[in-house]
Each structure stands twice: as structure tokens, then as C-alpha cells.
Amino acid sequence: MTALLELRNVTKVFGGGLFQKHRTVAIDNLSLTIEDDPPSILAVVGESGSGKTTLGLLLLGFHTPTSGQVLYRGKDLRRLSAGERRQFRREVQAIFQDPFAVYNPFYKVDHVLSVPIDKFKLAKSSAEKRQLMEEALLAVGLRPEETLGRYPHQLSGGQRQRIIVARALLLKPRLIIADEPVSMIDASLRATILETLWRLHRDYGISVLYITHDLTTAYHVSKDVLVLYRGSIMEIGDADQVINDPQHPYTKLLIDSIPWPDVERRWGRQHIVARDGEASAALGHGCKFADRCPFVMAKCREAMPPLYHTNTHRAVACYLYEQSPTVAHSELSGLLTRTSPENR
């Protein structure tokens, strides 16, 4: 079966032109497959500058790869016909970080919901349009009578973000790409937004690509986790295994940065810093994490390690596991568990 979306050996470079000499490799020869069925929830995690948002924008077609291909149902996004692009826009929806920037303050929030209904001709009458809007709002836990007819400033950030989720749901998408959807929401409302995404996945069979720097929320909402560092996959697999027993030194650093509610547990036990004068990865050689890794070996500076299949649902790009078999990027989707967080 043809995948819903696929990155095939994609590299995205910013800069390096006539007026901007500095080059930034945001995504480096990355391949990733998102299947249409069964639906999945994959979290993409990493610190700022790891390439998470660029990955999402490439999948949405908002960025064009410097090299490689982004495929929608087996066809390059750049070569879609008008009808195919329309279908792509309907099946792949986005939820962005800022719930404020989406709204025009001069329009009532109804406008955000009515535009996709009109554009995709989802309703034949005003009554049917109203019904679709009310059903979408109820699906994300909002009361239509308390939401419709209001201006954006009259609603909370959590309500505004859930309206954007409702807008995506109207189109019955196959995939929602959520880029830091709760980072600008009050802590008390984050659980509500994440629960809404999980219910849409469970009740409507929608896949979710959840982009975040927060491993705590990634663990609670996702089935699988992809750890990204400077545009390359460091570790990928079952969220329970990756979060509770990280194998890559970079993943261990991320986990160790989480402040745990335990006075006996020291925060930041693993001290990892860059070493001055060693920039092999910046020159295009070796592991990108070598200059920060406490386990660095000579071979780490010579070539980027492949992904090693360390157990049933795990792959790690680290020479510490070179006794394990390698796995191709095109085979990564077969490693993902799709285990429900409710069953952990």
C-alpha cells in the first residue's frame, strides 16, 4: 500500500547563496514514512534548532527540499495536479504554535470555520454549514452556543487553539501535523488540547505528527518518538522505551534535562558540553553529536553512524551499538509500535 506521506532522502539547506554565505543544514538526508493505515501518533522531539519545524513544513509542502523528494501517496508534491493538491490540502492539516496569529481580530471566530466549509464545498445550505461547525466544536469539547458569534479576544488561548483543531477536523483529514500546539497555552489547558488530539486519533482514525521540545507531553500523547538532532535521526522507536530507557547519548541528555518531582533525583546529572576546537561534524564528517558526547570515539569523527536496530521497536544512530544489525531509513515505519499510551 502506498504511504500517505514520505520523505525520501530529503535535505533542506538555508543560506549559502550570493547574499548569505553561511549555510544551515536544517534537514540532512532524512527519510521517513507516514502510513495511511493504521493511524499513528509520532512525536518528533529535539532541542531548538534540531530541524523539527522544518520537517513539518516540508511535509506540509510549505518548504521545498534542496534535494530529495516529499511524496504524497507516491507522487512528488511539486508535481501534483490542481485536483491532487486540493485533496492533499484536505487530507493533511496543520496546527501551529501560536493560537493568536491565526485569527483576524475584526472577524468573529465563525469565520475560521466557515472558510474551509465554503472552499471545499462541504455544505449545501447555511443550516448544514451551521450543523457542521457545531459538530466540529462539540468534537473538541467546546459548546457551540458559548463559542460561535464571539470575537477572538473574547475567548481564552485554549479555546482558540481548540477551534483550530475543530477547523482541521471539518475536513476529515488523514494526518494532523501539530507543531508545538501547547507551548503558548497555559499549563492548566495543555492537557485538554493533548487529550483532544488523542481523542481525534482514537475516535476518527486520524494520524498525528506531534512536534515538540517537551518530552513529558511527547510521552503522554504519542505512541512512538523520533529524536532529531541537527537534522538527523538520533533515535526512534516506542515512546515507552525511548523515554524510560534512552540509548543515544543525546536522548539521555534530553531526558536528564526534565525536572522530575523527586528531591532525591538530581536534575542535570549528565554533564555534556561542546569541546572547543573540535568541529568535525560541522565540516561534514562524523557524528553530529561527537563534540558534545562523553563517549566519543575516533570513528565517531570519521563517519556518521548508521541506524542500528537495537531491539524490536528501536533504532539508534550510535557506534556504541555497532554489534547490532543496521536498518535502512526506508524500513523505519516497520519498527514503530503504534502502542496506545492508554495501555502503558
Image (cartoon, grey):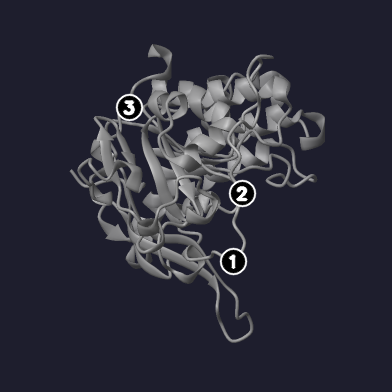
Coordinates of residue 247 in the picture (x, y in percent): 40, 35
Q: Is residue 97 visible?
A: yes
Q: Mark 1 points at which residue?
A: 277
- The numbered dot on residue 273 is 2
Residue 46 vertical position relative to residue 343 in the rendered view, above or below = below
Answer with mark 1 or mark 3, whichever residue precedes in sequence.
1
The reply, left or right, for residue 152 in relation to residue 318 is: right
Q: Which of 138 and 27 is in front in this view?
A: 27
- The numbered dot on residue 338 is 3
Mark 2 and mark 1 in contact? Answer it, CB < 8 Å: no
Other-residue count near label 1 (Cα within 10 Å), few / some / many at <14 / 14–19 / ≥20: few
The reply, left or right, for residue 209 in relation to residue 20 is: left
Q: What residue type is labelled 2?
A: Val
Q: Residue at x 43, y 45 (%)?
A: 92
Answer with mark 2 or mark 3, whichever residue precedes in sequence.
2
Q: Which amino acid does label 1 sit on?
A: Gly
Q: In 3D space, how far apart are the residues under numbered discs 2 and 1 (Cα atoms)?
A: 13 Å
- Find numbered disc 1 in the image and state the secondary structure of the residue it sits on: loop
